Image (cartoon, rainbow, N blue to C red):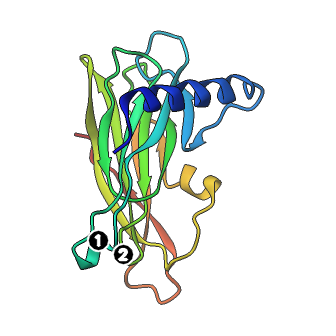
Amino acid sequence: MTRPYFQKFQFVILLLINSFSFAQTPTVGTSIQADFDGDGKTEFAFAVKVKEQVGNPMEDGTPAEYSVNFSLEKMKSFPIGCCETRLINEGDLNNDGSDELTVFQLPMNGTTCSLTTYTFSNGKWRVLINPILFASGGDYMEDDILQKRIFKEGNVVYYLAVDPNDVKSRLVKRKAILQ
């Protein structure tokens, strides 16, 4: 298990790395920046592995565990479960003046990935859009493709999903239900 002081050291290193890249604001990656609390200032979010995988989880081993950590103490970290992840700054989806955060995660086994969108409200993180599941076919998902999966047109939020009735697996626009 990762030691708390080592997590803080990782956090400081990631913060320093990000501070040198202000010219290009990262919107997708293991670390991103956004105004998550709507105060007009930039905060940082980091996907951090908090527990190493031990053995094969399908054979009584344990999977790795990840959490999302933040540069502001008032934003408590929250667990996001197993497997590799990337964070996505979605901008303000629910018109509350703050940016939302989507977590993209690979599966432990198989090819069904997930996107879960969170919002920071009343001092805590809560799910804004329930997990959206989709098959990746085992292919790597480019950052720009992930950035376009959830979007807003006017005041309506949509996501792109694979049409299960289309043999070419084309994407269709579906209205997202905000929680």
Is the residue 17 above or below the residue 159 in the image? above
Choose mark 1 or mark 2, whichever is in front. Answer: 1
Name the residue that disc number 1 marks: 57
Residue at image coords 37%, 67%: 107
Residue at image coords 43%, 37%: 101
Q: In this view, does 3 lie to the left or right of 44?
A: left
Is the residue 160 above or below the residue 178 in the image? below
Can residue 99 be seen?
Answer: no
Task: Classify mark 2: residues with Cα within 10 Å, few (<14), some (14-19) or many (20+).
Answer: few
**Marks 1 and 2, the one that precedes in the sequence:** 1
Residue at image coords 36%, 57%: 64
Give the residue furthest to the right.
23
What's the residue type where badge 2 is placed? Asn
Q: Distance between the residues labelled 1 and 2?
A: 9 Å
Image x and y of residue 93, in percent: 42, 34
Name the residue that disc number 2 marks: 109
Image x and y of residue 75, in percent: 35, 21
Work out which quarter of the rendered image holds the C terminus and state it. Answer: top left
* Element under disc 1: helix
What's the residue type where badge 1 is placed? Pro
Can residue 170 be seen?
Answer: yes
Image x and y of residue 49, in percent: 42, 46
Residue 2 falls in image quadrant: top left
Task: Classify mark 1: residues with Cα within 10 Å, few (<14), some (14-19) or many (20+).
Answer: few
Residue 115 falls in image quadrant: bottom left
Residue 4 is marked as: none
